[in-house]
Image (cartoon, grey):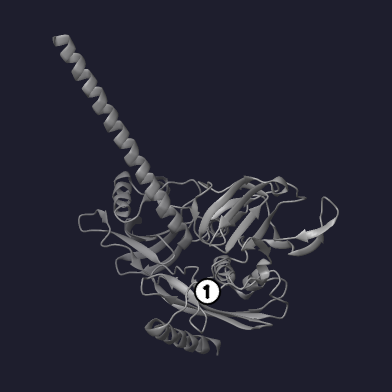
Amino acid sequence: MRFRYLRHLELIASILCFVLGATLILVDIYEDHQVDIQKDAFEESYVEAEEAEQALEEEGTSKVVAREKEVAGESFLVESRIKRGETLEKFLQRNNTSTDERKQIVQAIRKYFSPKLIMPGHRFYFRYDKNLPAQQNVLKKIIFILSNTKKLVITKNQSGEFVSPGPPVSLKTTLSYTHGGIEDNFYTSAVKAGLNASLVNQLIRIYSYSIDFQRALKSGDTFEVLVEHPQDEETGYVGYGEVVYATLFVAGGPLRLFKHTLDDGSIEYFNEKGEGAKKALLKTPIKGARVSSCFGKRTHPIRGYTKMHRGVDFAAPIGTPIFAAGDGFIKKMGRLRGFGNYIFIQHSQDYGTAYAHLHRYGKNMTKGKKVKQGDVIGYVGMTGLTTGPHLHYEIHYRGEEVNPQLVNMAPQQRLSGKSLEKFLQVMRDIDQKAKALRS
């Protein structure tokens, strides 16, 4: 009887251990998932990894950026950046902090920011006081630029411990004006005019609903851009900025767009009529690609005879991300004859879009899955009948393929009433600022 009782206890203990272990695993998976979600959102608002790596190579990983003479000694500021593959702990160790200091600093950061979100290029500024008689550098303060617009300050308190006196604070902003002309293509012309890669990509993204950058822009067209740059006076840091206003002066007339914050806190771009820049479908569901074949009759590159080409081909390297042109669900997905790896998205009763020759599908993409405009649904490849890597893109209207470049989609938003009045006031303010900087 006692033996059976012990066996029951062992069984109950085993079950409890299993439940506890499974719970811990699920909690860990959930936390990692939450970090992944935060990381996706964070990477959208921070410096692109390529730019950060280039900055590391060009400027080094640490440098003195400011010195200030004081009565008792000298205060100086050192900028240091996270290297590729470097953890926060290793980074702090490289910057000559003690074991106790590292624990305190990591704890102060973790209170507001997950160390798992640390990326190559993240900037830290270390404030040192030099005790001249002893010739020793004493760390007094750390400024962590945790995003393009926010910083976290960590200081040494009276007890000699590093703590954060408060949550992250927003950086002050300044406006800059840039204008230029189209020479070879928009990207290189905008960079030549002084815009960084992130700002150029912003412009391409907000205009991608209404203009074909490959064919609509001609040599001699011009542009102007008003940019809001975050900056920190103490460290001298200047963020890559956000487009506040832009105009493309093209043959059909100026295309003006203004940044506006809606009542729910979301940020959108509108033209001078209060019509949103976003349309139901993207004309170009891929970034930085070249149009290699247009909609219309052509000689098939493999089969050799003339036939109707019912889409637009975008030449791009294998692995280039492909975006969902609009909200909808995946109606078809898989191999489809000469199209190779294929996806068809149904957006509404009337509209659908097709994507062919994919190298592979996006993460978690399955038939029937709902997608949002801009989701990565796959990557450029050359499966099926093709002579090189490209995306074949089609827009279907009531079951028939139509020319994507001629589809004039209605804006997703039209402001009216008090919302329109509020926007028009914002637009007038931006116009005045642009006029002052322009002159």
Q: Quadrant of the N terminus?
A: top left
Quarter residue 421 falls in:
bottom left
Side (left or right) of 424 relative to 310: left
Query: What amino acid is at disc 1?
Result: Pro
| Closer to the camera in the image, 118 or 60 | 118
Which percent across, then down, holds residue 408?
61, 73
**Residue occupying the point 73% across, 77% down:** 219
| Residue 91: image location, x then y, percent | 42, 49
Question: In this rendering, is residue 174 above or below 321?
Answer: below
Quarter holding the C terminus is: bottom right
169 over 228 or under it: above or below: above
Q: Residue at x 58, y 65 (%)?
A: 282
Q: Which residue is mark 1?
A: 411
Q: Secondary structure at mark 1?
A: loop
Q: Position of residue 20 (x, y in %)?
A: 27, 32
Determine crowd level at label 1: few under 14, some 14-19, many 20+ residues with C-alpha closer than 10 A: some
Q: Position of residue 160 (x, y in %)?
A: 23, 54
Q: Residue furthest left?
A: 2
Q: Is residue 258 visible?
A: yes
State the residue in front, 164 or 112: 112
**How many marks can you see?**
1
Residue toward you, 316 or 129: 316
